[in-house]
């Protein structure tokens, strides 16, 4: 099932997500739906808050990128970055901000502790696109969007698009959620 994706102005994207205490059939189903939703939207990463679930859960599949054709899809639960090394700038986009892109500086490599889809604890070293996508999605679990990490002058260039999202003017090639507006 393809789930609707929450967009920039939706409150859930600004909340710190809750840790998972284990895996049950509901979480397994959510993981499957998240992969289907991400692939339907031509994404390479998706965090649970983006589909309306405030849980510390993300999925990623970067195998569609030329240099990562052999990369296995990943399920990451309750991630915690233990260490970072180096920095690089790269253009990012986000399914919650359709059509918006901008340069973001992030650590080039990370040491990450997390649980996989079997709730087994893993500690691993990630670099390149692995590190980039993991950090982008972990930001979602902490209520941060990539535009929050952009230089102010670069963010000013996309402010018109952000304002349009806030006023409900969104065009996406995939289903988007409509959170009720609160006064």
Image (cartoon, rainbow, N blue to C red):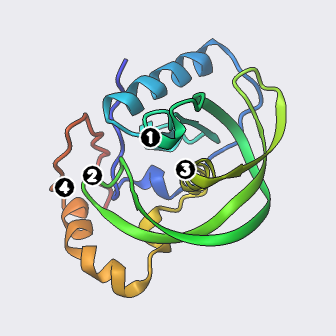
| Badge 3: residue crowd in 10 Å (few <14, some 14–19, many ≥20) | many
Which badge, 3 or 4, comes first in the chain's sequence? 3
Find out whether the residues at labels 3 and 1 contact each other: C-beta distance under 8 Å.
Answer: no
For residue 98, the mark is 2
Q: Which quarter of the figure is the C terminus placed in?
A: bottom left
Q: Circle 3 is placed at which residue position? A: 133
User: Which class describes the residues within 10 Å of circle 2: few (<14), some (14-19), or many (20+)?
Assistant: some
Which residue position is annotated with label 4? 168
Q: Earlier in the sequence, mark 3 or mark 1?
A: 1
**Is there a contact, CB below 8 Å, between mark 1 and mark 4?**
no
- Alpha carbon distance from label 1 to label 2: 19 Å
Q: Nearer the viewer, residue 158 or 24?
A: 158
Please tell me the numbered disc located at residue 65: 1
- How many discs appear? 4
Closer mark to the observer between disc 1 and disc 2: 1
Report how far apart the C-alphas of labels 1 and 4 lie in the structure: 32 Å
């Amino acid at each position: 099932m393809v789930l609707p994706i929450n967009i920039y102005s939706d409150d859930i994207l600004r909340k710190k997500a809750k840790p998972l205490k284990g895996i049950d059939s509901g979480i397994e189903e959510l993981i499957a739906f998240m992969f289907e939703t991400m692939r339907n939207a031509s994404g390479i990463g998706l965090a649970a808050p983006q589909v309306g679930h405030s849980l510390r859960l993300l999925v990623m599949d970067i195998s569609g990128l030329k240099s990562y054709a052999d990369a296995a899809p990943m399920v990451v639960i309750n991630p915690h970055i233990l260490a970072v090394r180096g920095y690089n700038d790269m253009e990012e986009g986000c399914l919650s901000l359709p059509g918006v892109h901008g340069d973001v500086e992030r650590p080039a490599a990370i040491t990450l502790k997390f649980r996989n889809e079997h709730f087994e604890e893993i500690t691993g070293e990630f670099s390149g696109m692995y590190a980039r996508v993991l950090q982008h999605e972990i930001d979602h679990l902490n209520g941060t969007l990539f535009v929050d990490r952009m230089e102010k002058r670069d963010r000013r260039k996309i402010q018109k698009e952000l304002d349009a999202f806030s006023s409900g003017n969104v065009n996406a090639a995939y289903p988007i959620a409509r959170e009720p507006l609160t006064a």
